[in-house]
Amino acid sequence: MQKQVDRLHKNAGRAWTRPASRSLLREIKKNGIAYLFILPAMVGIFAVILVPLVQAIVISFKRYYILDILREDPPFVGLANYAAILSDPQFWYSLKITIWFTFACVALTMLFGLLIAILLDQDFPGNNIVAVSVLVPWVIPRVASSILWKWIYDDQFGILNYILSKIGLKSFASFPWLARAGSAFWAVIIVVVWQSVPFVAVSLLAGLKTIPNEVYEAAEIDGAGFWQKTTLISIPMLRNLITILIVMSTIWDFKVFDQMFVMTEGGPAGSTMVLGIYTWMMAFGRLQMGLASALAMIMFVLVMIVTAIYLKLLMREETL
Amino acid sequence: MTAKSKFSRLSVVLGVVLLIMTMTVGIASGATTLEVWMMETGNPDGAKAFFNAVNTEFEAAHPGVKVNLSWIPWLGAQQKFLTSITGGIAPDVAELGTTWTPDYAYMGALEDVTERINALGYASEFVPALVESATLDGKLYGLPWYAGNRCMIYRKDWLEEEGIKEFPKTWNEFIEVTKKLTKDLDGDGKPDRFGFSVNGGSQHEFMPLIWMNGVEIAIQTDKGWKSNVDSPEAIEAIRLFADLYLKHKVSPEGSVTWSVLNSRKAFTTETLGIVIDLPLLVDRFQNDNPNLKGKIGVAPIPAVKQTASFTGGSNVVMFSQSKKKDLAWDYMRLLLEPKHQLAWADLVKFFPARTSILKDPSIANDPVLSVYADNLKYGRTYPAIHQWGQVENTKILITAMQEILLEKKTVEQSMTDLAKAMNLLFGYQE
Amino acid sequence: MRNPRSGHRALLKYAVIYVAAAAVMFISLFPFLWMISTSFKPTSETFTRIPRLIPKNPTLDNYRMVLGETMIPKYFLNSLYVAILTTALSIIVASLGAYGFSRFRFPGRSPALIMILGVQMFPSQVIIIPLFIVMKNLALLNTHKSLLVSYTTFTLPLTVWMLKGFFDEIPRELEEAALIDGCSKLGAFTKIVLPLSLQGIVASAIFAFIGAWNEFMFAMTFINLEELKTMPVGLTSFFGRFTVEWNPLMAASVLFTIPSLVFFALVQRNLARGLVAGAVKG
């Protein structure tokens, strides 16, 4: 993907240098058909994403208390919202647990995704049935699966506690998964990972299929076992794909909202108050849209930084 | 083929796409419509039938007017109201929960109806807690509609098994009863039947103990509203409640995050002996589990220094954006007619806002409703200030209780922190 | 000829594979089966100390209640309507856009592409109030069009990039040949490029459909009218004010899952390659 981006830059550079000698009008006319092709997409993105986005940026510099806006135009307060957020201990706590949450989700998703992809890449009777089963968690709508897991985690009648106490873990009889700070955090991680693994596994499987068998066979002749084949062949050859999947998962998990909202609403005692929920609370709980927008901008910048770091790492390794 | 025709063919395709994307304005119909929003109820069919009747009556009395009724789910309702108000498309009339009324009144979104209410002739009859909730700076911004208070709903048969004839009147006696009801029935060393649930996920059960111990949750000072939850009496009250879980262990382990939804389920499934809840639950428990028929009793909440109960309910409000205020008022007034008050009260098992209607035999002679109705006079409501919505929305009350139950903080520490958090929202500075 | 040692190893390998496969299938399927099981149970079998996967007295009461006494059927049809239209619309818009980006070099191309990629990083809960105002100004509130427009747009970042990856792989020579034969650009696109990227289109369709079928926050904010609500919002109203009703809740969840299940089943064959064929080579 980085190559694509590089190519883009080059092409864009070329395209932009040309109009200097010709008129801009002629350029537009010449490319008219190209603009027509992308027009519907750009109109949509402009009206539905960019315009509100710019408004949200403006709001982040205003004291925008919803209960005050009918009375007065929200006044500009400069960077006050950002200063307030950065000096708010809850923000730092939320940031910390959001990073942990994202890290745990991405790591577990990639690990299980890769293991399942490798499993599905093997040739064995029944492979198809397993491949289809793996997709099921992805198919269940997020709201429905969050409700389903809440039922599974139920302390009194949940099936999880029943199974655990049946296999000898007596202390899990009526264990309140969503009522303890630590276990609630992990309970949501399990649900998010459960739902994200299929996409990663299927993507990695498609990647594995592109590695020619001869490569593995050659390695086997050299005496490579499963571990060597995976770490020395599969992972390096899929590095681009893995990087893209990590970036995408990081973005998705960093913004987590639905599952957390349905299952814990940030509780118990604020222990699962990730940034996505905290932002929502700030907007629709405290009604401080200015602070909420500032929070969202900070989240946005953090995601951009993470993405940039990943891409940078990828690029460096490629040039080496 | 020329470039021009290629171009135009593409344009047609794109035109169609854009048309689908931007096809927008529906043509407004000619009739006057009154937009009405009501909160969803536990009995949707009954509620629909009730409003069909009300709307038919209203439309018959106002030819050419059509009532457009929307049902708003409680989850996400706050967001829906706010976005509609800021977007300038608030309805004409809406039902608002009592704790939300001050928010929107402060916002300027609600019409001041003081004069209209005073002209009704029965303004002095309203349940006091409702009037308190609809008042901001001495003006009324909502028409009290119905009230719901909480009492103790308990297993009569379980109490009798323990030789207890009468439901306790004091909190200390109550503790002893809950201890007796908590039992390990299957002998695995862990109790599987509980006396009570502390419901760390909902505040209406534990906050009233502060009133019951003789103090207010927040007090008005010359510097504005100030939280009072860190007063010794409030701390003592909260400790009494938390001890049910921490010390007496009469409450299920998971009840740290339980809300009434969970304690109701536990009561239905016969794993819980006593809940604090609304009158309509008595019927529901018996419907959901026929085995409970005849085994349920109701009683006032046992007193610490006195008894008290959170009394919520709803007001009907008129939005200041409405261009049909007189029509809106006619509609609101219609809901307060005795026959509609009684029908609605019967349907949702709440109480009419007009206390004169409480004397109706359908309430006064009902063994359950009469207990609740008698206790309406002990009903209290949270401070009617616009920041209260934020106190509830940000869940700081629940968080404080959960921190105590999880033993992350002592009662003193947690209540001191809660007072700070509340004062921050109130804008109070020492 | 095989030596016995490699026979042992093959056996061991199969043992490991089947144990792993069994574990994977259990974890993937069991929660879903539990959802189905609960949806067929009467309340008396749900709140019991000894749960069973196969109900002793299976009942259709929960489904009867959900289908007969609630608005769920209406929500369901609304969701289906919105999701199908979103899928169709976003395939059209995204494939046009992706083709434009893949085949033409024009001023502003690179910033536009990066912008498309960038917008999906923004937390959507904050643009909801400004977006609400936009929708209000376009008189789109309380219409399915508001959802159609926003869902289509929010799927574009992914679908445009995905389809562009596919189009990039199709040799230009094929279209050039068609152009020489008198085909228009659009004709070359619809007759040559689209059929060759069927897998990519299928993958994009999945994303669009699942995205629209899942979405909760916009639907909750833009739609007030009961008869226009979609499934995720409708399902949460089931959480209710009064008590937790797991059995009908699970029945409604099963119904909610069926369309995406069917959709996946239909396109499953094309799914694996379609998802990443573009990205792998990237």
Image (spheres, coloured by chain):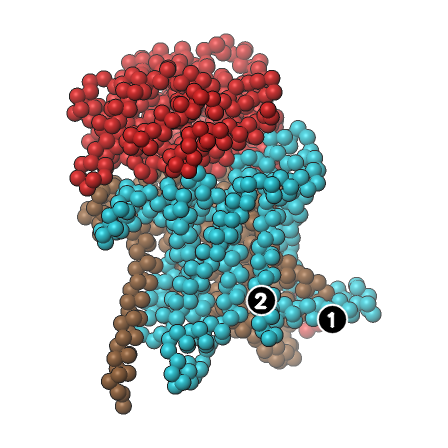
Q: Measured from the top left, where is residue A119 in percent x and y?
A: 36, 70
Q: Which mark is residue A14?
A: 1
Residue plotted at (53% across, 14% down) = B117
Q: Is residue C149 visible?
A: no
Q: Return the chain for callout 2.
A: A
Quick one: label 2, few (<14), some, or many (20+) residues within 10 Å? few
Q: Determine the secondary structure under disc 1.
A: helix
| The N terminus of chain C sits in image quarter | bottom left
Q: Measured from the top left, where is residue C210 in percent x and y?
A: 46, 56
Q: Which chain is cyan?
A: A
Q: Determine the secondary structure under disc 2.
A: helix
Residue plotted at (52% across, 19% down) = B219
Q: Which chain is red?
A: B
Q: Return the chain for callout 1.
A: A
Q: Measured from the top left, where is residue A4 in percent x and y?
A: 61, 70
Q: Is residue B187 visible?
A: yes
Q: In this image, C261 relative to B225: left or right?
A: left
* Residue holding disc 2: A313
Amino acid type at circle 1 is Arg
Amino acid type at circle 2 is Leu
Q: Colour of chain C?
A: brown
